[in-house]
Image (spheres, rainbow, N blue to C red):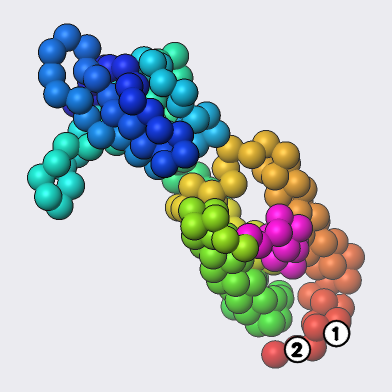
Amino acid sequence: MRYQGKITNWKDEQGFGFITPNGTGTQVFVHIKSFANRQRRPEGNEIVTYEIKTDAKGRAQAQSVVFVGERSPSASSSGYSNTPFILAAAFLIFVAGLVFTHKLPLFVLVLYLVASAVAFFAYKLDKLAAKNDTWRISESTLHLFALVGGWPGALAAQRLLRHKTKKKAFQIQFWVTVILNCGALGWLFWSSGAEGFRSIFGAV
C-alpha cells in the first residue's frame, strides 16, 4: 500500500529525515537510500508517495519513496524487464550451438563465458563502491570487458543490479560495444568461414 506525505526535518548531510503523512498519522523515518530516484536529493517540504516497512526493532520506515509527479517504481518496467536476460542467454546459446555443430571453436564460447563472468563481477564491485563511496571501476574498463565478449554478463548485471541503466551516455556507448563485438564475430565467421576461423584461434 502506498501513502502520501510531506518530507519534514530533512538533514541532507546525514541523508535522512521524516515524512509527515497527509491527514493524521505519526511521522515516518526516511533515508536517502529509500528514494527511487537517487539523482534527485530532497530539500524538504516535497510531497512524496511511499510504502512502509518495519525494521528489526519494529520501527516504521519509508521505502520506495517517489516524488509526486515522477513514476512509481512499480509503474516503470525498465529495471524489471526480462528482455535483457533473454537476449544474453539467447546469444550464448546461439554461440554454444555453433560450437557444438563444429562451426566455431570451443575457445569462442569459453571467451564469452569467462568475459561475461568477469564483467558481471566488475559491475557488482562498482555498484558496491558507489554505495560505499570508495574507489570506482572506470566506465572505459567496463566497456572494454563488454567489447571483448563480456557484454552478455554486463547486460545481466545492469538489470539485475540496477546499475548504469539510467545513464544515457553510458548506455549508448555500451550498445556500441555490443554491436562492434557482434559485428566482429560475424565478420570473422562469414568472411573466413569456419575453417578460416579455426585457423585464427586454433582448432579445439
Q: Would residue 119 be visible to someone looking at this image? A: yes
Query: What is the spatial separation of the Cα atoms under label 1 and label 2, in whole angstroms?
Result: 7 Å
Percent position (x, y) of residue 190? Answer: 83, 64
Rendered image quadrant of residue 82: top left
| Residues rendered magenta in the picture | 136-148
- Magenta stretch, overall SS: helix
- C-beta proximity under 8 Å, tags 1 and 2: yes
Which amino acid type is marked by label 2? Ala
Which amino acid type is marked by label 1? Ser
Mark 1 highlights which residue?
Answer: 199
Percent position (x, y) of residue 89? Answer: 52, 59
**Left or right, residue 138 beside residue 125:** right
Residue found at x 45% / y 26%: 42
- Tell me the crowding category of disc 2: few under 14, some 14 to 19, or many 20 or more residues within 10 angstroms, Cα based: few
Q: Secondary structure at mark 1?
A: helix
Residue found at x 76% / y 58%: 140
Residue that sits furthest to the right in the current view: 191
Residue found at x 67% / y 43%: 171
Percent position (x, y) of residue 51? Answer: 24, 30
